[in-house]
Every structure is written in C-alpha cells, then in structure tokens.
Image (cartoon, helix red, strand yellow):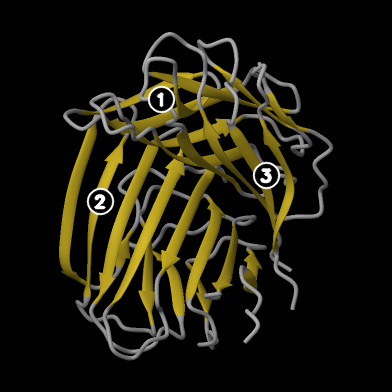
Amino acid sequence: MASKYTLIASSTVGSGGSATISFTSIPATYTDLKVVANARTDRASNNDWVKIGFNGSTSSFTYREIEGDGSTVGSYTGSGQLAFFATASSSTASTFGNAEVYIPNYTGANYKSYSVDTVTENNGTTAVASMNAGLWSNTAAITSIELTPNLGTNFVQYSTAYLYGISNS
Amino acid sequence: MAAGATYEPIATTTLVSNQASVTFSSISASYTDIILVANLGSTTTPSICLQFNSDTGNNYSMTNLYGNGSSAASSRQSNISQMNFNFLDPGTTIVSTMLFNIMNYSNATTYKSVLGRFSNAGTGAQATIGLWRSTAAINTIKVMLDSTGPLLLSGSTFTLYGISAA
C-alpha cells in the first residue's frame, strides 16, 4: 500500500547562500502540507526569525507564539510572517535551527492556519524553543511557499527545507 | 520483512453540520502509533477533548504549556473524565489546527500517552501531554467538547492516520 506522506520537493542552500527558499507549483492533490526546515542565516546575531509567505503574499499574516530560552518563558503576538527560528552567524558553528510547519487543508476555502514547532539548540545560552500559531487570512489555495530570513540577508550553505504532502485518501 | 505503509489514512470526516462530537471506531491495531489531525472551529468557546474506548471514568490526566500572545502558563489536571487539549479559544471560524500523536496505542500492557498541539493565531499556542490510565488497546477515539451546548463547526475536518514502525 502506498504511503500517503509524500516528499513534494526539497531545497539545500548552496555555497553562495540564498535569500529565499521557495516551493512553487504545489499540486492541489494532497490534504495537508508539512514543511521541515533546518536553517541558519547570515544575521550578525545568535538567532533569526524565518518568515513564511504563501502565493507570493506578504500581507494578512498574524501569529501568536510561546517561547523559552532556558531561563525565561514568554508569549508574543503580532501581525506579520514570523514563523520559526533559525540560528545565525553568532551561534555555535555548524548548528542549524529546526522547524516543522504543519498546514492543514491548504486548498480549502477557509483562511489558512498553520502550526509551528521550532528549536535552535546550540549547546550554549542562546538556544530557544518555540511553538507558534499562524494564520494567513486568505481563502486562496496555497500554490507556493516562500521562506525568507527576517533580519539576515541570506540563508547560509547547508540550510535545508523539505515539503511533504499528506493525503487523507 | 518489508516495512508496511506508514502515514496511512485510517478514516476522515468533514462535518456537514454542526456536531457535538466526532467518533472514530473499530480502529485497526495494525499500526505502531496514530496521529489525529483536526482543522476546526466551534460555536462558542469550549475545550476540545478526547476520550478513548468510551471510557467516561476519571482515568485521564494532562499537563499543559500555553501562551496567549501576552503571557505564558502551565497547568495540570488529574483524575478527570476526558483529556482537555486547549485552554485557549478555538474560535468561531475554522482556523484552529490540532495535532494529536497517540503513541503505542494498541499495546495491552501500558497506559496510553498523547502529545497534543493546539494552534490558533487569534488565541494562542498550546502543547499538552495527556495520559489515559488504561492498558486496553485504543480502538475508539471520541473528539468532543468539555461542555454541552457548544458544537464543532460544520466544515471542520478530522483525519486519523496510522504510523507503522519500519
């Protein structure tokens, strides 16, 4: 019996870095989408946010998240595309932030919600773990996904992202 | 032995009217773990709960971590009659995502644990670990609300997947 958890596309950033990771022409044949990312940016800091966009849109995104850094916990909300954490230039070498973004009913007529789990463990004091609830207030089917650093310019080499399609039939 | 299929859809439901609950029954014991994915809303602001095998006894407990956008909190409930997976409003539109990982659900030796995630950009994010103190294999899952009156919204979707060990 065939698996219903299918790799649609993957991306690995090359030596020159990349300002964005994009998945385009996403087929409408699945029920849900999952993005699994392992990311680091060139921001001159310990961590960076990664923004998510759908169908080239940068508007109508909102989120609420809870995060802990090993000593404090907080919860934040905002309008914008902030989705998950990446490590950045000041973080421990060779460490990358991990994230899973689950997007149910990406072709449905409702606004598109997504659930994010992310960490930037680095054997140091600047790690962060976060859960994020995101919403794109748009009824269009998602046909493309764009990931971009929030404050950095580029994802650095060896950053990866995988897009999976999940079918309920 | 060749590995079986994994992430296999067991059953799926899209509500065509507002309903008080959704039940998956006769769940096959042939997987290792099961995952329940829901995209839902409700008519008012109850908690989304799970019950297993029609057990309404006080055999459930859970520990929660959640944030509403301005503050973070953790809580625990013990000896209750269902697992509550959100202390945050699921909203009256279908914009909540819920993911439930039910590990080793078919063994007949251990109590059953559930890792749940609730996400709603309007109200917050929550993680919950739940425990059902029963050694019975799970063959029925009821998704319900913690109070009578509120209903799950028409158009809400619920899908149960089976995960097989390699």
The one nearer the camera, B31 or B15, is: B31
User: In this orientation, does residue B132 appear?
Assistant: yes
Check disc 2 and report its element: helix, strand or loop: strand
Residue B4 located left or right of residue B128 = right
Quadrant of residue B2 within the rendered picture: bottom right
Pointer 3 residue? A163
Residue B94, given in percent of the width and then of the height, sits at 57, 46
Q: Which mark is residue A146?
A: none
Residue type, mark 2 in image:
Asn
Residue B54, given in percent of the width and then of the height, sits at 37, 84
Q: CA distance from mark 1 to mark 2?
A: 34 Å
* Residue located 34% across and 24% down the image: A76
The one nearer the camera, B31 or A65, is: B31
Residue A35 located left or right of residue A77 = right
Q: Chain of mark 2?
A: B
Q: CA distance from mark 3 to mark 1?
A: 26 Å
Are the residues under badges 3 and 2 in a single subunit?
A: no
Residue A72, given in percent of the width and then of the height, sits at 18, 28
Residue type, mark 1 in image:
Ala
* Residue located 38% across and 48% down the image: B45
Check disc 3 and report its element: helix, strand or loop: strand
Please state which of the two labelled residues, at mark 3 or mark 2, is closer to the viewer: 3
Q: Please rate how many residues cluster around mark 2, counting C-alpha atoms within 10 Å: few if below 14, some from 14 to 19, many from 20.
A: many
Q: Chain of mark 3?
A: A
Pointer 1 residue? A93
Pointer 2 residue? B64
Residue type, mark 3 in image:
Leu
Q: Is residue B139 above or below residue A150?
A: below
Q: CA distance from mark 3 to mark 2?
A: 29 Å
